[in-house]
């Protein structure tokens, strides 16, 4: 399973992308929650209107693309809704309006979770720092709990000490770059 997270502002373009039945064999709306509109196009137009009138934010959507491994058992509606809820908890966006869709093409399915970042009560966009790191943590826990094998990148251990010299000052770094001689 691969999960990609982006903060986006082009709500209408996103609506056309997620509702595109030309490039996708099947587009299935799983849920539209917390909006006045009951369809994804209306919901995303609602986010755009709220973003432009209530905030100075450029990005009104937290867009999550979920690509399950087609060699493993498919994710049913219950599991994808559980993962969407876990991602909302991880991002700190519980209670925010959201849209969950499934695309099916080339005999594979993938999902789109679109979460509104606009906090209507406070008139500002919700900050979601470290969104990619948070999504990786949630996906690791979800995969562990449900016996799903993840791509190698999710298990990679980063060696923070490799090629790091904490005693290098900025001046010494420039000197090394210029001369090739370290201290």
Image: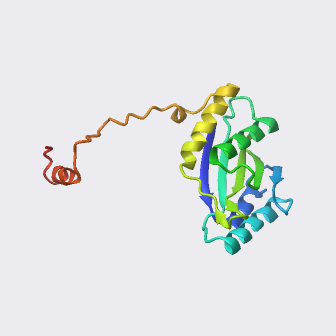
Q: Residue at x 53, y 49 (%)?
A: 130
Which residue is painted at 77% across and 67% down in the image? Answer: 46
Counting the numbered discs, the total is 0
The one nearer the camera, 56 or 58, is 56
Q: In the rendering, at what x and y percent does residue 114 appear?
A: 71, 54
Residue pushed farthest top? 147
Q: At 62% from the left edge and 43% from the top edge, which residue is drawn?
A: 3
Q: Locate the N terminus and report the quarter of the image it occupies.
A: top right
Q: Position of residue 168 (x, y in %)?
A: 22, 45
Q: Is residue 132 left or right of residue 108?
A: left
Q: Is residue 101 above or below residue 154?
A: below
Residue 33 visible in the picture:
yes
- Location of residue 47 (image quadrant): bottom right
Quadrant for the C terminus in the image: top left
22 with respect to 145 (left or right): right
In this view of the protein, which residue sits in the foreground, 120 or 173? 120
Q: Position of residue 97 (x, y in %)?
A: 76, 56
């Amino acid at each position: 399973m691969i999960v990609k997270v982006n903060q986006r502002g082009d709500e209408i373009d996103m609506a056309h992308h997620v509702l595109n039945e030309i490039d996708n064999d099947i587009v299935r709306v799983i849920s539209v929650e917390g909006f006045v509109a009951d369809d994804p196009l209306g919901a995303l137009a609602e986010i755009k209107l709220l973003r432009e009138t209530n905030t100075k934010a450029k990005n009104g959507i937290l867009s999550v693309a979920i690509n399950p491994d087609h060699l493993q058992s498919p994710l049913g509606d219950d599991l994808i809704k559980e993962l969407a809820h876990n991602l909302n908890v991880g991002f700190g966006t519980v209670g925010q309006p959201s849209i969950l869709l499934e695309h099916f093409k080339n005999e594979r399915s993938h999902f789109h979770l679109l979460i509104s970042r606009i906090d209507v009560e406070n008139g500002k966009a919700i900050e979601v720092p470290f969104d990619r790191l948070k999504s990786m943590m949630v996906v690791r826990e979800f995969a562990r709990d449900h016996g799903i094998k993840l791509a190698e990148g999710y298990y990679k251990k980063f060696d923070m000490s490799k090629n790091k010299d904490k005693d290098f000052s900025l001046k010494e770094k420039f000197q090394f770059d210029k001369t090739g001689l370290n201290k």
